[in-house]
Every structure is written in C-alpha cells, then in structure tokens.
Image: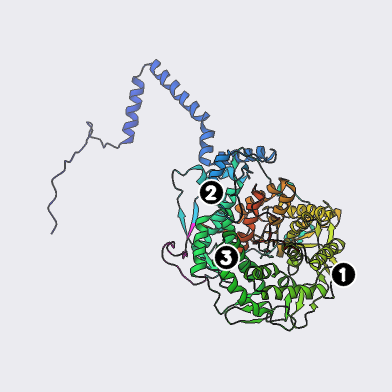
Amino acid sequence: MYPPARKDFISLTLTDPHGHNYNNGKHRRQSCWRKWKQLSRLQRSLILLLLALLLIVGLLSYPSISQQWGGGSDRDEWLDLTDRELNQAPPAVKPVLGVEAAKALAPMPVPHLGPAEVPDTVAEPKGPIIPILAKPPIQKKTISNKRGPPGTKKDGNASDVVAGENQEPVVVQEEEEEGREDEDKEKKIVSWRGALIEAEQATEPPPSAAEKDDAAAAPADPAATVPLEVSTVKVDRLEAVRDAFRHAWKGYREHAWGHDELKPISKSFGEWFGLGLTLIDSLDTMWILGLKEEFEEAKNWVEKELTFNKNVDVNLFETTIRVLGGLLSTYHLSGDQLFLEKAKDLGSRLMPAFKTPSKIPFSDVNIGKGTAHPPRWTSDSTLAEVTSIQLEFRELSRLTQEPQYQEVVDEVMKLVHKLPGKHDGLVPMFINTNSGQFSHKGVFTLGARADSYYEYLLKQWLQGGKTEDDLLEDYLQAVEGVKKHLVKQTGPGRLTFVGELSHGRFNAKMDHLVCFLPGTLALGAHNGLPGDHMDLAVQLIETCHQMYTQMETGLSPEIAHFSLQASDGRDVVVKPADRHNLLRPETVESLFYMFRFTNDTKYRDWGWEILQSFNKYTKVPDGGYTSINNVRDPLNPGPRDKMESFFLGETLKYLYLLFSDDPELLSLDKFIFNTEAHPLPIWPSTPK
Ligand code: DMJ
C-alpha cells in the first residue's frame, strides 16, 4: 500500500498568455527583435557603443587573466628575482641583536664550560629555491609506526620490527594549516627538497654511458655550483643549527628511540650494536646546543634503559669513539656521575678485545660474554681502528684511577711506533693480531682505514700535555711523508689534494674522510708545530670546500678524483660509485678549526653553505636527515633512508661551534675532540 499523497505544499503552473511552451527559444528571439525595432535610432546607437566599449575592455584585460589562471607569473617573478640576486655581493657578518636580546636567546649555561653561548646573527644566504616556494606545495606525510620515549609516543602503535628496506610508506595529504606565521612557512620552505626526496624513493638508476665518462666531463660550470646569495633577511646561524638538530632529533625520537640509527624515509630504525648509538652520540651535542629538555629525556633513557650486559658483538673502535667517548664527554660537560658509571661499565666490557697474542686488539668483542674475535675472514685489524681508541681509554684511566685501560692502548702505540714497514711515517692499512706486523703492505692513504691514526698521534700528544715524544715524532714524520708522497696539485685549478700511494703508483683519489686533515694540521700549527703545516691546511681546506661547491647539490661526494693535466677541464671528478654523501663531518670539522685559528669569516660562510645544502637535499619533511646516493643530481639525489649517528654527534656540533662567537665554548687549548667529536679535557700538567 502506498502512503496517501502529502498535501502540505502549493503547486504553481506557469503558462504564457499565448499558450506557448515557456521554453520556446524561437519565440524569444522574435520578441527581442521586435523590441529592438521599437527603439529609436539614438537608443540603438548608444547600446551598440556600450557593447563595443565592453568588448575592448575585455580584450585588453585578457593576458593578465589568462596568466593568472595559467599560473605562470609566479615562476617568471622567481626567475627574475634569482637573476637579480645572483649578482649581489656575498653576505656580511652583521650582528643585529642587542646584548639583552642575545642573552635572552642564550642556551642553558654549561657549568663545566664557563659562560653561556650568545648566538651571533648574520646575513642569510638565500638560495634560488626560496622565492619559488613562497607558496609551499602540499606536504606529504607518512603514517607509520611511531616510536618515542615513554609518555611521548604518538598513536600507541609502536613496533619493534625493523622495517624492510623497501617498505612503502602510506602517504596521505596534509593540507597547509591556515594562519601560520612566516617562521613556520620558512620551515616548510626549507623542507621542500625533502618532500621531493620522500616522493622519489626510487633507487638510483644505473649510470648512463655519459655518466660513466664523467672523468672526461666538461669543464666546471660555475652555474652548476650552488651560489651563496644574499638577502636583507638576517638569520641566526646558531639557531639554524639548533633547528636542524631538533628536526633530526624529532625523527629519531619518534621512530628510532633507543635504537642505533634512524631510517627517516621508512620511519623506522636500523640496529648495529643495539646500544642507542645515535642517542649517546648526541648527548654532548644537545648539551652544547643548550637543548635542555631533549638532553634530560635522553639522560633518562641512559639511566633507565641503557645496559651493556647483553650478548652482542660490537666493533671495538666504533663503540669506543661513539659510546665510550660520548659518555665521557657528557660526564665532563654535565658533571653527572651517571655517565662516568656507564663509561666504566662499558670500558671494562671492551677489555677482552686486547687479549691477543700480539696485544693488538681484535676488531670485535662480545660485551655480554666477554669474548673477542677478529672479523670472520681475517685475523687482521684495521690500523686506524686499533690506534684511534687511545684518547678514550687513557681518559677512562685518569678518571677511574685504574691504569689498565691506559696500559693496553699505550702498548698498541708503542708497538706501532717500533714497527718496520712504514714509508716515511706513513702506515699500511692493516695489522695482524697474531704477529703484530703490518699486513697488506704497500698501500698508503690518509683516508679510510688509516685516517685517524694520524689524527690521534697529535691529539694524544696534546692530551698528555705534550710530554710523550714518540707520539710527536711519529706525527711530524708522517706529515713529512704526506707532503713528500701524497700531496699534489690539480692541473686546471691548482687545487692541492692528498692522494694515495699503491705499490709505488700515485692515485689521484681523495676520500672525503681526508678532509679531517686540514683541521688536524691547523691544530698542530697552533700548538707550535711548523708553520708550513698551516699553509698546507689552508690549501687543503680550499680543496675540501671545492669538493662541495663543484657539485650540483653543493654537497661533497664520498670520494673525489682529481685531474692532474691542465687540459683535463675540471679539477674534481666523481665516479658513479662514489657519488653518495653520508652526512659526514670532516669538512665542517676542519672549517671549525680553521675559523678558530684564523678568524677568517669565509670559513663560516662555507660552513653555512653546507648546512643550507644539507637542508635542501637531505632533510626529510617529517623528521630526520638522510644520506643520499647522488650529489650530482639535484633533481633526484636519491635518499638512502639512513641518518648516521655522526650527523648529530659531529656534523651539527662542529657547525654550531663554527658559528659560535665564543672561543671559550670548548676552547681548543683546554679540550681535544676525539674522532667522533666528543670533547675530552687536555690533562692538567703535573708539576715536575
Ligand atoms: C666517524 O665515525 C668518525 O669521524 C670516524 O673517525 C670516521 N668516520 C665517521 C665520520 O665520517
């Protein structure tokens, strides 16, 4: 049955007087024509004139309307602006804050370091990316398993499962919030490249034939480098480093808390030793940057969660420089016994590594079981690894008054000091744990596997108050060996670099790792070593700088090759396999030393450019920074989904210290930095 028809409405039927259908168009046209005919000639002329005027106005305004809808004007304006700004002068250092305002911005006091830092302010270099981003694109956000410290986890769906390398993040659109202030907008601007990175997680395509021939590439194109531009906007460089740290920390805190490394793209974590590497590597950086809340939260994790009583194989060197070094330096900065207790526990658990026939330690030690072993395929240890743990073990002995830590590492140095097989102070890359002899002789490098041997010769000598002559002798001899065998200049631009020697043949190849050397040479010269060490440092840091500026992303490759012939065109050549960047610190480390010893602000500007490039090409929108695959491809740098702990432990720390105006903030006359940038005190001299 149907319900009765409702009667609560009024029905109207419209009919025209002529009984025609209301929609009859023909009738309407006839009626209009009749009305037009009824008008006077004057009336008709006026109407026609009016219509003509309307037509003209419409035609004149057409281009701007079409442009507006076509979206072209913004881009044209951006191009104009870029050209204009490219011709401006480099930035000047101009303080803009009054003393009181600056004090208000100062981070928490560093009790063991003296006065708190006062941020400096400088002209902001502005890349061409900024204007085009005045209206940032819609950001992409990935839904993921959130991890975080207790009470801070979001969503409550944390998972301990390590996400696979190819895990596809779920992408949702996040509308831009209305009414955000400029500062907020600027943060989005900076993350624009990061957004691109996240969208393009593709693995690096295989190199084309042209890329393979990169060695014969065209001369350096100045336009391909990243220009340092100037705007009238002032930025606080120290605050920019804090922002970068906070951003990196956000990713770690949410997705990798308590684990070794953040995988910022897949929003998960990677485990190496399971010791919270990034967290511990970051402790003293947070202290130095004045990030008090973050520090307290991390300290709480160390107190409640960190345990070394676990059945895990760790690498002696990496654990010493990152974890032992990080705990010791944080103890010195904060004065908190917690960190010393943890350092003692770890130090004692690493000692089994030294129980070898030669007293040259094994590379790996199980800190739970107290057993140690070399890598599975060899009984060799890497030379840099066994000779770059001394600063930390020696300091542990001094603090605990337990001599065994210093004794084992001093023994290694004594053995290496006496060992035949060096080449004018240069050492091979491996040493055998059974025989105690160098192995794989004939290859000499200042890069991977040998680098920090040279660094620690000087730094141990400084740490001990310049009293251990063997260390100084070995260091001076090594620098002479470097100058004699490894230093050369490029043909095209006369850039000085440190190459490698392989069985008598020179190889014009330099790891980015070698860029620690200018800083170390400068530190030696500052401490009374020959002046030509400083000259070499000045030349080498210029080359390290060029390794950044000659790349399209403004970031250095992992390894650079150099052209020796003037006709070769460009100085720096990058092979396809070496185009990655792991967020390494060595160049900014050396820039920090160079600035401290020369006060030349160009070193700061170079560091600022590097930070800008990290922000542009490695920053991941929702948190964290990522290593990238290709520094030569700004459109697809190829994120690797890994944030190394040294980015927070070293890179950002050195950038902060580089921009700081306070030479007493970790004075280089009172502290030496271990090879992971953890500052340890220079020992007070004992009265003779
Ligand atoms: C760090 O772990 C240390 O600086 C080490 O000496 C070399 N490699 C990385 C940084 O690049």
- In the image, 242 versus 194, the foreground residue is 242
Residues at circles 3 and 1 in contact by the CB criterion of under 8 Å: no
Q: Is residue 245 left or right of residue 603?
A: left
Which is closer to the viewer, label 3 or label 1? 3
Is residue 154 rendered magenta in the image?
yes
Magenta span of residues: 141-162
**Pointer 1 residue:** 504
Residue 339 vertical position relative to residue 33 in the rendered view, above or below = below
Q: Which mark is residue 187?
A: 2
Which is closer to the viewer, label 3 or label 2? 3
Quadrant for ligand 1 reads bottom right
Residue 248 vertical position relative to residue 368 in the rendered view, above or below = above
The answer to whether any part of residue 199 appears in the image is no
Q: Residues within 10 Å of mark 1 (few under 14, many from 20)?
A: few
Three-letter amino acid code at disc 2? Lys
| Mark 3 or mark 2, earlier in chain | 2
Residue 207 position, x and y percent, is 69, 63
- In the image, 69 versus 547, the foreground residue is 547
Count of all numbered marks drawn on residues in the image: 3
The answer to whether any part of residue 453 appears in the image is yes
Q: Is residue 293 left or right of residue 676?
A: left
| Mark 3 or mark 1, earlier in chain | 3
Marks 1 and 2, Cα distance to the nearest angstrom? 52 Å
Which residue appears at 78% of the width and 74% of the height? 414
